[in-house]
Amino acid sequence: MIREFWAENYLSIRKRQTVNFETKSKDDEWASVNVGGNKRINKLAVIYGANASGKSNLLLAIQNVFELLFHSRAKRTQPVITRRSFALTQDEPSSLFVSFYANRIRYDYTVSFNREHILHEQMDWYPKGAKALFYERSFVDSESKASIKFGTSLNLSAKSRETFVQNTLNNHTVLSVFGKVSFDKDAKGIAELYNWIKDYMHEVNFKQYSLAQVLKSAENNVDTRRFFLQLLKKADFNIVDFYTETVTESKIPGIFAQEITPDNNNSIFEIQIETVKAYFVCAAGDKTFILSLDEQSQGTKKFLSNLSCLYSAITSNHVFLIDEIDSELHDDLLLYFLNAFVLNSKESQLIFTTQETSLLDEDLLNTHRDFVFIAEKDREGAYSKYTRVDEFGLHKNLSLYNAYKTGRLGAVPHLGSPIMFLDDDKD
């Protein structure tokens, strides 16, 4: 779970912007996770704001810090894995920080970089509750190896330390080296962190297999299948069952197109491709009929896709980042999904953006105001700012929905009159 995050000079974020997901509330313990002592982290975080306010950029920044930790580079000439810095300070380095819990151990990680080099990174951890150095690295120059120091609590052998030093290029992080080099068992601490990122930290909108493949996997697992059918029934889609078929098709790749002539045996250019097809058994009264996945509505497909996320969140502990979660979903269905996530997950976390303001009128958000963040563009500096709603000091009896709609929280577009003036001397 992510405890805190900040970004500086990254996309629309110019000045350092910090978001913290801890809660001080001990009420409704199902809404947060006790990560040790008196510290609790919320399971949900929702980001509201006008278009172009920087909502999506915050998710991308969180994703990027874990991309840096996970993906290495094969050549020193490749750029650092990042997106552009703030437009007005492109020559300055970007910095990201994340404090998170992996396998119930806290890690604090800071990294500064430009397009060519990782300039500095430091990972601290709390293996026994007390802060200790995981590793620290500094850029020397483009022709030299980075300066790397490992903490004694990692118990790395001299051989493993040297392997990391020799394989850390100036354009990727130290941790990412684990993904391209074999290490002995003494690298257990690094292996556990690297594998946690691989298995449980998901990129924005959790790219996965095709929906048909997801359904095929669910079809072959009794528990997953029961879960999917139960939720589809609750969502009132009239779906009572589903099944998949694997179809083998012969196709001619485009690279062979110029070789095909009437005199050729075209079969020598064909390759066999397996495609998974999904079908749903739908009920209408006492009768049933079959619809293919392609014939389902976009809303149904979106809900099915979210079910994969929900099942993972309930059966294990994951961090999901979803942009525009309300896209193609009815507001009641979205609220149902969010409640199911919070009430049934154990130590999973969902951070998402939305334009669905009706959620602010629901108990889930109106009661847990520390779930909600407001993204707003600074009018003069054109950079993004983020504020947690409980920092506005709203009275608990004041409707969060009304406060947002009337502009008390900011983050609403300033549209002006809908009357258009087409004369040259009018704006």
Image (cartoon, grey):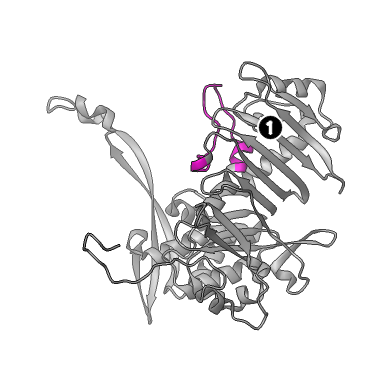
State whether residue 423 is above or below residue 205. Answer: below
**Residue at image location 72% in from the left, 29% down from the top:** 137
In the displayed structure image, the side of residue 116 where residue 417 appears, left or right: left
Q: In this view of the protein, which residue sits in the foreground, 252 or 245?
A: 252
Check disc 1: other Cα within 10 Å, few if <14, some if 14-19, many if 20+. Answer: many
Q: Which residue is mark 1?
A: 120
State whether residue 250 is above or below residue 290. Answer: above
| Residue 343, image quadrant | bottom right
Q: Magenta part of the protein: which range? A: 65-88
Magenta stretch, main secondary structure, is loop
Q: In this view of the protein, which residue sits in the foreground, 378 or 164?
A: 378
Q: Quadrant of the C terminus?
A: bottom left
48 in magenta = no
Residue 172 image position (x, y, % from top left): 61, 30
Is residue 230 in view?
no
In the displayed structure image, the side of residue 65 where residue 422 appears, left or right: left
Q: In this view of the protein, which residue sits in the foreground, 340 or 371?
A: 371
| Three-letter code for the amino acid on which mark 1 is drawn | His
Is residue 49 in view?
yes
State whether residue 27 is above or below residue 381. Answer: below
Extreme residue in the front direction = 425
| Residue 375, image quadrant | bottom right
In the displayed structure image, the side of residue 28 where residue 220 appears, left or right: left
Residue 364 image position (x, y, % from top left): 62, 74
